[in-house]
Image: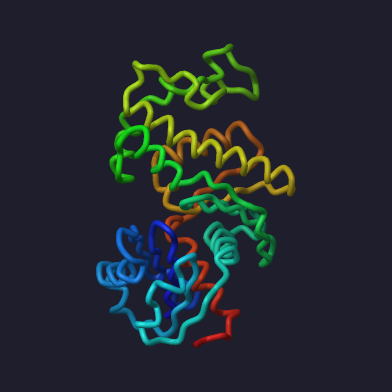
Amino acid sequence: MILGIDAGTSAVKLAVLDEGRVCATHYQPNHDTTAHTLQQALEQSKINALPITHVAVTGLNGSRCGAECLGLPRCTVSELDAIGCAGAFLSGKSEALVVNMGTGTTFVLAQNGTYTHLGGTGIGGGTLMGLGRGLLGVHTPDELFQLANQGDMGHVDLRIGDLFVGSETLDPTLTSSNLAKASPDSTRADWSAGLLNLVLECTGTMAMLACGAHQVSDVVLLGALTRLPQAKARFQVFTQFYAPNYVIAPHADCATAIGTALLTKENTSWI
């Protein structure tokens, strides 16, 4: 069994694979040092009780996550390759635009086992929490998401339907200008819904443009933000009104850890 570790800025993600089969995953928010977070993740998930033989690591904090303490052969994997590999594997698609919505957002083109980094954006989960702290005094993701679930983004976002009745390609519920309708009457919940929608729509729109530039018809979405009901609903709207098909991958929150474990088949640099 191979343990894949994605030690990111805001969370540590784990995945255990056995002959290409996902046996276990775990997502642990990073509230302390990355090494301490990894230890917490292993203990809470009980993954360390599994017969793991090798460890593969990726992520910005990969070199500081403490994987060497496991005392197993380990290697380091390119995070961009892990994102592309995971998106292709989990979606079953040989060609797709893989979008990883983490603290920021990364775009990787997966084509028959080749993974090309197309770029990225600083808009992601970190943006959402920074705006939530600064504008609303919200300090945890759960608090912001619960607020958003109670709010109405139509109270802060200017929609197509606010301007005219819409058209064949412009549904009245689509956003014309994010947060442009916010007023003193807008509640914290409305603001939360609008902020979440801002991040999701920016990601969806950039993915659509990237697909057009590279003639790709499928978008595979990874990252913790995909677990939100609002994400599923918003990307269904993108699929309905734009050409690409948006798919939220299974195990999306731990997908890069899965890709990291998968890529060890090609890695012989164990230490």
Taking the view exactly as shown, the residue that stands out farthest to the top is: 164
Where does residue 213 sit, x and y in percent of width and height?
A: 74, 45
Question: Tell me, what colour scheme is on the image?
Answer: rainbow
**Is residue 120 shown above or below 176?**
below
**Is residue 172 shown above or below 90?**
above
State the residue at coordinates (60%, 37%).
205
Residue 133 appears in which quarter of the rendering? top left
Residue closer to the observer: 21 or 43: 43
Which quadrant would the N terminus be assigned to in this image? bottom left
Where does residue 2 sit, x and y in percent of width and height?
A: 44, 78
Is 257 positioned to the left or the right of 165 in the image? left
Taking the view exactly as shown, the residue that stands out farthest to the left is: 44
In this figure, what is the number of numbered marks? 0
Taking the view exactly as shown, the residue that stands out farthest to the front is: 134
State the residue at coordinates (45%, 67%).
61
Residue 245 appears in which quarter of the rendering? top right
Residue 238 appears in which quarter of the rendering? top right
Is 62 positioned to the left or the right of 189 in the image? right
Where does residue 85 sit, x and y in percent of width and height?
A: 58, 65
Is 152 positioned to the left or the right of 109 in the image? left
State the residue at coordinates (42%, 75%).
3
State the residue at coordinates (58%, 11%).
164
**Is residue 235 shown above or below 40?**
above
Where does residue 192 sit, x and y in percent of width and height?
A: 37, 32
